[in-house]
Amino acid sequence: MSRSVLYTSSPLLASKTPVWRSRLVLVFIAAGFLALVGRAAWVQVIKNDFFQRQGEVRFARTLELPANRGRILDRNGLLLATSVPASSIWAIPEDVERDKGKLAQMAKLLEMPLAELEKKLQDDDKTFVWIKRQVEESVAREVLALGIKGVYQRTEFKRQYPEGEAAAHVVGFTNVEDRGQEGMELAFEKELAGRPGSRRVIKDRLGRIIEDVREQVPPVPGRDLQLSIDSKVQFFAYQKLRDAVQQHKAKAGSVVVLDVQSGEVLALANYPSYSPAKRVNLSGAQLRNRALTDTFEPGSTMKPFTVALALDRGLVRPETPIQTAPGRITIAGSTISDAHPYGVLSVAEVIQKSSNVGTVQMAMKLQPKEMWELFSSVGFGQRPQLPFPGIVSGRLRAHKTWRPIEQATMSYGYGVSVSLFQLARAYTVFARDGELVPVTLLKSQAQAAGVRILDPNNAQSVRQMLFMAAGPGGTAPKAQTIGYSVGGKTGTARKQEGKGYAEGKYRGFFVGLAPVDKPRIVVAVMIDEPGTGVYYGGEVAAPVFSTTVQQTLRMMGLQPDMNVKPQIVVGVEESF
Amino acid sequence: MLRVNILLLAGVMASAMYLVRLQYESRHLYTEIEKAQSEARRLDNQRERLLADKRGQATPLRVEQIAKDQLQMRPATAGITVYVTQGAAP
């Protein structure tokens, strides 16, 4: 009989160990599993924030949503400044592949010397360096196409100024970080800038956004700013000013155009100017907004105010005769004289001929306090209420400190200093029948409410005198236009240097209004240091006034108020 | 009983798979939306740039030069303008 083995009941398998040992093993295993379950619950349910955070760090990103900077528009909605995307090239110096040929190509594309580029990439410790900011997108594409390792691009915003240098001083400019630095860009930085938003997202392995984690904070775009400037008037005024400054070899010039009804500034230009988009080698002279920041003695342009006050006090009437012979008058030991002796002049003729002696005679009948009150109420010595950086208030001393000779010289504009803008604004008193109008650089629909300063009849009388001054026999016949009646006053002042007056340095200016019967605009022009020997306001500034008025009124669609010899060959059939 | 359980288990499995698929699809669509939105932003920026360019081409300086040189135009003066008043015609 063969011996067979019965495996099921093998004596070898028969356990000799006690049962408790297997039970103990079972308990250990069970305990191990329990511990795992406990840990899993701890990690995933109870104390999960650490791992949640670690996970988020790896997949979640916070993105900044840039806010668009508001645009600056002119009164007709034409762009004066807007932001357009531009590419900026940056690099991680450590990672950049040092291929001389490719780097040279890149330097050429970016229009920078190779040495400068290499200097930027020199510092290996840095993990981020701008190579060139705000380049054209096509250039950026070409740079990236070179395929240099460690060179990247990023989209930024750059400001564009289609109007260029004509409106540079008003609009101003922003820096490379898109923050306002000058002009309206600076003055309205808060409104224009907007507020960037943000969102938290989860990105996948390929960098695609697959989910928003939290609610988005949407960006608040900057507000568009609509200025009162009319870009056509602005351009025209700038062009004429530039031509005049160049023609007379002058140092600088300014022009201001105000809308009399609304108090809006239609144009404000200075020369020399600059191109806001290409600001290299800018000088202080180019940046100066002279119409608002430069003050000068207003000279003869002050006389209409003295005469208006004398009329308002009932001391004279427009036809009252005044003896100006022998063309000299002595006040407290000082002699004031006229350019020519005129003899007897009416009050109106005193303005027309711009007689210092006649004006002083009227001024000496007035109280210093009255004069001071009028001058300061029309804005002299007061900072114009414009939201603009660097505006000056000029100088008008307290009347208690005036000596008689000062009262006399102030009546014809010496011993007091004003900016061209203040002068233009002050003339709205005559243009608005005695009301001073508040000025604004922002577009406003409504007619501005003025403050009454003079009696309407007297303001109208002064306007007629200004009309005479700009007419034949006056001091500025060159201010006349075709079709529109104009009135205005010339001024020529010697420039102050240190404590005295500079030899041979003058400023010629002209302030006027048009049309005389129902004025719509006030225009002020100033030419600084004409260099060709001709320096009278009537010669250098009045022609700029004339062309500016002519074009502005035509663009406003105003019908001429004076007879014009028609030059139209073909008649117009009135069939409507 | 066992059969019902197996059926339910199969149902749960199918539903779970479907959920995974939907999640995948939703993420995919989300990426598409993102793409479309960034394209919209790009177009918006381009529009802004083109507007600026257009304005740059129509500045008074350029208009005046072309009018003068190419079209032989000259500035209008009051002498060659006929003024019509609105509402004054019969």
Image (cartoon, rainbow, N blue to C red):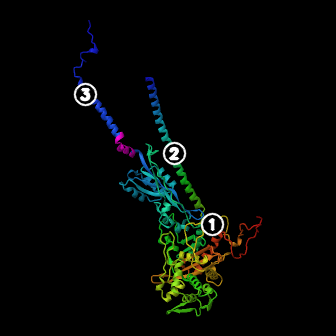
Q: Disc 2 is attached to a residue of which chain?
A: B
Evaluate if marks 2 and 3 touch, with contact meaning CB atoms under 8 Å apart.
no
Helix, strand or loop status at disc 3: helix
The local crowd at label 3, few if under 14, some if 14 to 19, many if 20 or more residues have their Cα within 10 Å, is: few
* Residue in the foreground of this view, choosing between A444 and A193: A444
Q: Position of residue A380 (x, y in %)?
A: 52, 78
- The amino acid type, in three-letter code, at marker 2 is Ile
* Residue in the foreground of this view, choosing between A296 and A214: A214
Q: Let me know if residue B38 appears in the view.
A: yes
Q: Sequence order check: which comes first, mark 2 or mark 1?
A: 2
Q: Position of residue A536 (x, y in %)?
A: 57, 82
- Whether A502 is among the magenta residues is no
How far apart are the two marked residues, 3 and 1, measured between alpha carbons?
A: 103 Å
How far apart are the two marked residues, 2 and 3, measured between alpha carbons?
A: 59 Å
Instruction: Give the residue pinned by disc 3.
Output: A24
B16, above or below A88, in the image:
above
Residue under the point 49% across and 92% down: A332
- Whether A50 is among the magenta residues is yes
Q: Let me know if residue A536 appears in the view.
A: no
Q: Which residues are magenta?
A: A44-57
- The amino acid type, in three-letter code, at marker 3 is Leu
* Same chain, labels 2 and 1: yes
Instruction: Give the residue pinned by disc 1.
Output: B64
Q: Disc 3 is attached to a residue of which chain?
A: A
Q: Nearer the viewer, mark 2 or mark 3?
A: 3
Q: Which mark is residue A16?
A: none
